[in-house]
Image (spheres, rainbow, N blue to C red):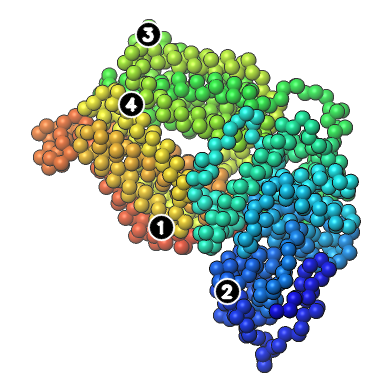
Amino acid sequence: MEALPLTPNGKLDRKALPEPVLSADAVYAPPSTEAERVVAEVWAEVLGAPRVGIDDDFFDLGGHSLLAIQVVAKLRKAGIGPVGLVDVFTYRTVRELAAFAASSEQGARPLLQRLTPPRSATVSYVCVPYGSGSAIVYQPLADALPADQALYALAIPGHDIGLDEEPMDFDELAARTTEEILRIEGPLVIYGHCGVGAALAVELARRVEEAGREVEALYIGAIFPFARPRGWLRFGLMDRLRSSQTDINRLKARGVDLEELEPGVADRIIATMRHDSKAAEKYFTSLFHADDRPRLRAPIISVIGERDPATDYYEERYTEWGFLSDTTALVVLDEGGHYFLRYRADELAAVLRTHRRLEAGDRTGSWWVHAVSTAADADAAPSRDEIAPSMRRFLTIASGQQLSMIGSALTGWALPITILVDSGSVTQFSILAVLNLAGLLISPLAGAIVDRGDRRRVLVVADLCAAGIQAVLAGLIFFGDLQLWQIYTLIVALSVATSFQRLAYTSAVPQLVPKRYLGHAVGVTQMTNGVAQLIVPLIAAGLLAWIGLGGIVVIDVISYAFALAVVLLVRFPDTLPWRPREPLATEIRQGFAYTWHSGGLRAMLGWFAVLNIFLSPLLLLVSPLVLSFATLRDVSVVSVVTGLGALLGGLTMALWGGPARRRFRGVLLATVAIAAGSVLTGLAPSLALIGAGAFAITYFLTLMNGIYSLIVQIKVPYRYHGRVFALNTLVAWSTLPIGMGLVAPLGAALFDPLMAEGGALASTVGAVIGVGPGRGIALLYLVCAVGMLAVVAGALRVGRLARFDSDVPDALPDDQVGVETITARRAERAATSGV
């Protein structure tokens, strides 16, 4: 077959193609070759078109980048090709694409693909895609550029699913790309988006300047430098085991939908994305730790979406690029998300010219230059504190807080158990659990105080108050006549103090660590919290038998004293801590407003509220049930098993990723499994059965919560997640007192006499589950199980819940929501001003 006519830059010369032979009606021309037939059939299948002519344009028929991925995957499976994603954008008709695929003279592909028409350019943009992204992600930006500008996008080997390309080593890729950049004439600007896009863009700018060419500016989109702390090992096992579905769900929540792709294709994209993320972290880590790292002459300008959580703390973090360049600047896209390349291309095209006039506060429409920082500014600025964030500083504070958490967990385990053993009253035990919720109820106020105050000062006061409360409790135990009302009062006060402590500590973490290490620091806090939950039950029973409740409370006082001493000795850097985008009360109010307008979400929220009434007593009453026939040591063993259920449930969710389709049905199935665990728990006075049942309850409860979170991710726009989760938490709090404070004690008090020797149910239900102490609680487990099954059955009869997965549409991409928000805001202003 003869070669296709090409332009000097290697693209198809459309003007040199022969005129198409059209059908009689000059509209539809059928395929005439086998390659054209296959391409037309694939297009028709992907686009849902009844027929496709050989001169139809893929994008005029409704095609876009994600459908193009399906096209190249199906053509590859049909043996047509090799055809890459860029080829679908270049050869836009069936005739052109089939001819290209069948051509024997495709030749070697350049790494840089020119996405703008051949023309002389006053400036050329070299753009690097994000992890696993193809060069075509920059097509919208290329289309938005003025006619006198050119755009070259980097086609990273291994990113195009239609081509059999081996991934290229980072240094080799940078070297070969630099060679092609140096052949581009005229002024150069480099842009990189997100992780590997930013890393490669930095390295390309460095190499181009080293070769003697000027780079007018280096733009970095949707990311700041991130690295691994020196000496920290990377544990990659979970990355290898984690399901691709987890990342597919996360991407879908941000507007990149891979669900329609074949599993093998989606898996390859996710694997490439993970590889690219590791490569980017490795590159930035080496730069941060290099003594002789190069500095760029070009300014580094961060471009971020205002609503993108990946670029939180942007007011401070843009200056981190100062370790590479003397000039750093920040441009913010109003209401922007993470993948603004597709939805804000016109604005991004204008943003990429701001380096020629960098002025802080300069606003153009819906984006603005937020700040500019230079080395001269830094030299002239007075030294504020000379205290720098560091992992050592963070780990020192974390060690003190971890010790106090373990001490609190010991008291939290031993105190209610002691009251239960001494009084034998499930009611008193339940009241204690309800009063312990005081800290949750005070959280909105505590959060507001923490957000407006000095985290270190709040942490000092909270630790001091908690230590004082525990000291009073210890004094009453050793020297006074401890009364029940005193315990209740102290528990409420302690719950409030620990709420302040927890909020102040977690929000101070970003303040303590260099923010490039923030992800690793957050991982440490999550891990230590899990360790406390597993360790405490193992040692609490032995300590309670050895030193008693008073001794455990003394240990708690000492742990708080240690935490307080650490906080007093360690000064906090004057950097940005964590702050919510909105006050919690605002989140709850707006979450209610959003949920109320969706019948499906509203029904689901009500369903969870009813379910929690039957669910909340299950974990509360495990200890009283075990103590009715076993020892404190047995209670601690069952507590460990319960914690393992939650841990393994979270691990399963990470490895599985959750259901890909019928997600609310997954919630219902998990609820049925929890009910089965509840039946198992109450079936007989057996540690093995109770342990297995408690494990099942926490395991499937963790799965159910994970699937619920997944539903919110998929069905609610990304920017509203916090609001909906806050509302759900409020609903859960509202029913916890009912389940713990009413259902648990009243149910036990009602059923205990019925299940006693000679009781009304002794000869019927008692013949199955036994009679005697604790069997009333066992019966309550069975009743709660029946209640949960009834709630599930009710959901299947309510149309909005039974058809939830199909009737509630998936959320719009976050950046599209941002565009609509801006449009609505402009319309409102225009209406108000009478324009």
Residue nearest the observer in this picture, 145 or 91:
91
Q: CA distance from mark 2 to mark 3?
A: 81 Å
In what element is the residue under mark 2?
helix
Binning the other alpha carbons within 10 Å of mark 4 as few (below 14), some (14 to 19) or many (20 upward) gives many
Identified at 39% across, 31% down, the residue is 434
Q: Which residue is mark 2?
A: 42
Q: Between disc 3 and disc 1, whose residue precedes? A: 3
Residue 469 shows in the view: yes
Q: Which mark lies nearer to you, 4 or 2?
A: 2
Binning the other alpha carbons within 10 Å of mark 3 as few (below 14), some (14 to 19) or many (20 upward) gives few
Quadrant, the N terminus? bottom right
Q: Which residue is mark 4?
A: 636
Quadrant, the C terminus? bottom right
Q: Which residue is mark 1?
A: 801
Residue 600 shows in the view: no
Q: Which residue is mark 3?
A: 478
Q: Between disc 2 and disc 1, whose residue precedes? A: 2
Residue 440 at x, y percent in the picture: 48, 33
Q: CA distance from mark 4 to mark 2?
A: 61 Å
Examine the image and state in which quarter residue 532 appears. Answer: top left
Q: Which mark lies nearer to you, 4 or 3?
A: 4
Q: CA distance from mark 3 to mark 1?
A: 55 Å
Q: Which mark lies nearer to you, 2 or 3?
A: 2
Residue 713 at x, y percent in the picture: 53, 51
Residue nearest the observer in this picture, 559 or 393:
393
Binning the other alpha carbons within 10 Å of mark 1 as few (below 14), some (14 to 19) or many (20 upward) gives many
Q: Between disc 4 and disc 2, whose residue precedes? A: 2
Q: Between disc 1 and disc 4, whose residue precedes? A: 4
Q: Amino acid at mark 2?
A: Val
In what element is the residue under mark 3?
helix
